[in-house]
Every structure is written in C-alpha cells, then in structure tokens.
Image (cartoon, helix red, strand yellow):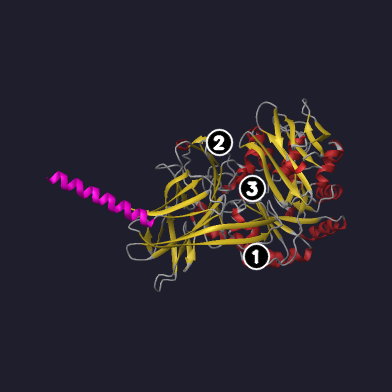
Amino acid sequence: MKIISFTLLCAFYILFTAEADAQNTKSVSSPDGNLEIRVSVSNGKAQYAVHYQDVVMLENSPLGLVTNEGDFTSNMSFVDASTDEIKKNYSQDKIKASSVQYMANTLAYTVSNQEEKQITFHFQVSDHDIAFRYELPKWGDTRATVVERELTGFRFPLATTAFLSSMMKPMTGFARTAPSYESGYVTDAALESTTARFGYVFPGLFKVGEDGWVLLSETGVGSNYNGAHLSSFQDGMYTVEYPQMEQNNGFGSTGAQIGLPGFTPWRTITVGKTLKPIVETTIPFDVVEPLYEASQAYQYGKGTWSWIVWQDNSMNYEDQVKYIDLAAAMDFEYILIDAWWDERIGYKKMEELIQYANSKNVDVFLWYNSNGTANDAFQTPLNKMNTSIARKKEMKWLKEAGVKGLKVDFFGGDKQETMRLYEDILVDANDHGLMVIFHGTTLPRGWEKMYPNFVGSEAVLASEMLIFSQGVRENEAFYASLHPFIRNAVGSMEFGGVLLNKFLNRGNERGQERLTTDSFQLATGVLFQNPVQMFGLTPNNLTDVPEFELEFLRELPTTWDETVFIDGYPGKYSVLARRSGKKWYIAGVNAENAAKTLKINLPMLKGQEVSLYNDDKERQPTLQTVKVGKNGELTVTVQSRGGFVLTH
Ligand code: CA
C-alpha cells in the first residue's frame, strides 16, 4: 500500500512538473520557419535548445548568471514571455557585404529568482542566426551590479566535432603579451578531446554530425563588458567563460561592471545545413549600432610595410623611402611604418618622411605600443596610448603631421579594463581623423559598425609567424583554408599577407622558404577580408615577379559589396566569391597534399570569359582566359598549397 501511494505520488509529481515545464516552454522561429529556439525553466533552472528544420543543433543548455546582487542560476521561476519582430536595413562600407537586410523574430523571456529579482533573456532569431543576451533591470534602488560569471552553455549532440583555437596562457609568450588570439587550431576534433586549460577563443565552429554546422561567437562588446570565450569541454558542454584573473598581470576584475538597467553582450549562434550561412553571416553587425559618428569619410585601401619581411633593421629613413616608392609604384594608398620609428627616424624626420610620402600620393599609418602597464613589450613609441593625457597630446601631433591611421599593438587581455582602453583609443583617434588597426589583440566584436574609424584587428596567427616559424610556414595553407569559415567570418582580419618573396627575408635567396605558390598568395588577397590591407611585398618584387601579378594587386579592391560561399571544407580547401561593384573575384586555396580538381558552380559568371590566375604542375604562376559554362559550371585544378583567382 505504501509502495503504491509513493509511486502514485511520483507519477503525480512528474505529471505536474512536466505540465509546468510545458506551460513555461516558449519558442520562436526564424522568418523562414527553419531555425527555432525553445526556452524553458525546468526544476528551477533556465535553459534553451536550438533546432534547425526540426533537427537538434543544441540540446537543452543552461541560461543564467551570478551577480554580486543576486544569483540567477537556480530556484528560478517563469514570469512571462512575449514575442515581436524586427526588420531593418543597413549599409556598411568595410565588412563582407555593403548592404544588409536583417529580419528576425524575437522572444523576451522573463524569470525571477528566489528573492524575486527578475532578469530577461532576449532572443533574436533570423533565418540562420540566433543572437541572445540578458537584460538586468533596476532592482529596487539597486542601480549598479557586477556580473561575476555566467552559466550560459552550449550542449551539442553527441556526433558533433569541433574546430577551435585555444586561449593562450595569460602572461606568457613574447614579453608576456599573451593572450592575443594567435594559437593554432584543432579541426574535426572529438568534443571530449577539447580540454585546453584556458578554454577556446571565439569564434568556435562545430560540425553537428551530418546535420549541419554551428558557429558560436560574441558581439557588441566595447567598454560595457569584458571579452568572453568558450570554456574547455566539461560536463558534456562548453560554457561562456570570463577572462582569467591572471590576465593583465593579475590586475582588474574578471567580471563586468554594469549600470542598471543593463545588458550582457550578444552571444551569437549561426546555423546552417552547409557552410554557406557561416561564410556569409553578418550577425556580428546586425545587432549592434554605431556608437559615434565618423569625424570624416575614411578612405580604405592597400599599403606596404617594411617590417614584415625586412624587419627591425629597416626602421630607418632610407628604407622607408623605398617602401613609399614601392607603394607609389603599386598605386597603393598607404605605407605602414612599424615599431621603433620614433627612436630610429625621430619625430622631426618623420614629418619630412610624411611630406615625401604625400608628394608621392601615399598616406601614412604609424605603429604604437599600447603599453604601458600591461606587459613587458618594449618596442617604442611606448606610454603614448595608455593614458588620455599622453594620447591626446600625441594625436594632436599625428593630426598636424598628416598621419591617417594607427596600428596599436600588444594589448593586455580581455578584461573590461582593456576593453575600455580599446574604446578610448578609438574615440580619441576619431576626434583626430585617425583610423585604427589593432595587433597583439582580442577579436573585434562588432567593432566595424560600432566604431566608424576601426579598420581591423589581427587576432589570428598572422603573417609575422610565417617569418618566425617553420611550423607555421608548413601549415600556411591549412590555416588559410580555415579563416573564411571561422575567424574572418565574424570580423575584419588584419593578416598582413600576400608575400611574393621566395624566401621571407631581405636577401630573398635562402632561409625562410615560402611553401605556398604565388597564386595562393594572390588568392589570400581576396580570401582574407580587411578594409585596409597591408601587403607583404618588397621593393625587389617590382622586378622579380611577373607583371600580371603586380597588375592584379594594383586592381584588387579591399572593400566588398557581397560575399558568397562557393565550396570548401575547413582545414582542407576553401573557395569563395566576393563582388566589388560589378566585378566578381572568385578565390580558392588547397591545403591538402595532392592537387585537387574542383567542379565549381558560378552562377554570377555564367557563359562569361574570365581571367584565371592559377599554378601549373611545376607550381609556377599562370594567367589564362577560360570560359565559364552556360550553366555556370567551371572545372579548375588547384595545386597542393596552391591557389587560384578568377576575375573578369
Ligand atoms: Ca601579433
């Protein structure tokens, strides 16, 4: 008898809970109906799940956070939910597309904790993207809080594999400048194997068995928050993790200080049956707005920089003249003059050098150390960007001298402390008509739209490591084949590539041998997107590479109206198309050990005669005219560690 009533009790309990769960489960679908998010509270815990065409892409995954004014991780109860829709169009001159239409259905889901403090989960679901964030209202008289950590998780189905770049150990590497988003990648890795001690940087790519692809990232982070990342895989999932305490030499909090009402940043989930929605996503920009107006119309373009191949020894007046002349001969708009210019050229001579550059129709970017208090990076100019007093004085000189942009290097980490420094540099630079490139840096999180004078961040194992490391040279094609699907899918990537020296040094006769072909290098000029491209050409390239390669680079745009996924598999090969005005560029690279013959579909070039930059079997550059089939089909062979570009 006792047993029966216990069983009955259990049955009632389960029935009751299931009914309560069903009642508080709210879902919202994308405008095309394919992507769906389901939010619920179960046993006092808030959770969400993601389905695409009714297939699970994320299983029930936790929502919640801990603040110093309240815990929102357990004993939660459902309050209410509402849905709405958003439609907006915007234009952008420095991302993968110039004109974007954003349509999403929204769900606002409010819960309260044991103390009856509320928070709201905001979801926006467009056809291939989910963006979500937490809203923290004013709690009585409480107008400020510190968010200490988050529960936000991502629980993938069992068959999923991961494509991830690990977070670097704080205060390690060159002059204790890590972390700076310059690790390699694991590809197609079993989730259980992704246990890097410091987690993984955004964005992270996941292949959900044969069901599709998911890209996780974060956007809308300025001075308002810290930069988060993915934890290592534990308890069957990844969670949103805040910066490690050890960053910035242990100084500054790991959480975020926000005023109420306030929001966490947007976390984004891009979902597709194929990789097309991943390559083409604009979600980092769809959900953010400009934070100030551009002080002027900024001009993007191409530049030369001596440091990448000729290194520190080129930091003298005469060598910089050679690179200004190279920029002029290439019809490039810019020269970037890198570290040590203040000591080895000097401010007075720099004014002369800028005038010389201007006389050749070339404008100047100058390098700065962001330090310093965050690490041991010693390259000068130092102590010019990290306080508003020094920065404004320096920028006054920069404006008077006619400098058009800055490259600021060696940042401390992802704490809110450092995010405030990025924003302070950007806003002061805009007041002085300066564009900004960041190196030794975090991922830009919506910055192209938020900050009108921001023109790109490194945040990748970039061209400098091709000079320094044989291992990176051997993996150059492998990494290049990943970027369109991962790093460059969510933000401009200041890679500093297109290296045409056979040997990546000043002599160009022996030493650091380039293992990729010339056409591979040209292809990266299209594949890697950044509105200002500093190319790794050297003055000798004017006479030692075929004229058609130089002509290609003279014509190459750096801003795009449209980007289209054509073919590829991250880590193996990658082909995409970009359009500038009426002109299409289709570029591909092959990271595999054997030549690859691809039958690609190019509806935009149906029946047209086009120029094909490619490699022959001896890996020498070729230029030929080919005709795309009336059905848009074209067969092209790509050499191992080679590449191609098609244009018309
Ligand atoms: Ca770097």
Q: Nearer the viewer, residue 84 or 585?
A: 84
Figure check: 428 above or below 217: below
Image quarter hosting the N terminus: top left
562 sits to left or right of 386? right
In 3D space, how far apart are the residues under numbered discs 1 and 3 (Cα atoms)? Answer: 29 Å
Mark 3 neighbour class, 10 Å CA radius: few under 14, some 14 to 19, many 20 or more: many
- The residue sitting at the bottom extreme is 141
**In the image, what residue occupies the spot 76% across and 38% down?**
645
Magenta-highlighted stretch: main secondary structure?
Answer: helix
Q: Nearer the viewer, residue 578 or 609?
A: 609
Amino acid type, callout 1: Val
In this orientation, does residue 499 appear?
A: no
465 sits to left or right of 334? left
Mark 1 neighbour class, 10 Å CA radius: few under 14, some 14 to 19, many 20 or more: many
- The image position of residue 413, as x and y in percent, is 55, 53
- The image position of residue 66, as x and y in percent, is 40, 58
1 vs 2, front mark: 2
In 3D space, how far apart are the residues under numbered discs 1 and 2 (Cα atoms)? Answer: 38 Å
Going from the N terminus, do you reach mark 2 or mark 3 first?
2
- The circle drawn on residue 280 is 3
2 vs 3, front mark: 3
Q: Which residues are magenta?
A: 1-24
1 vs 3, front mark: 3
**Quadrant of res 366:** bottom right
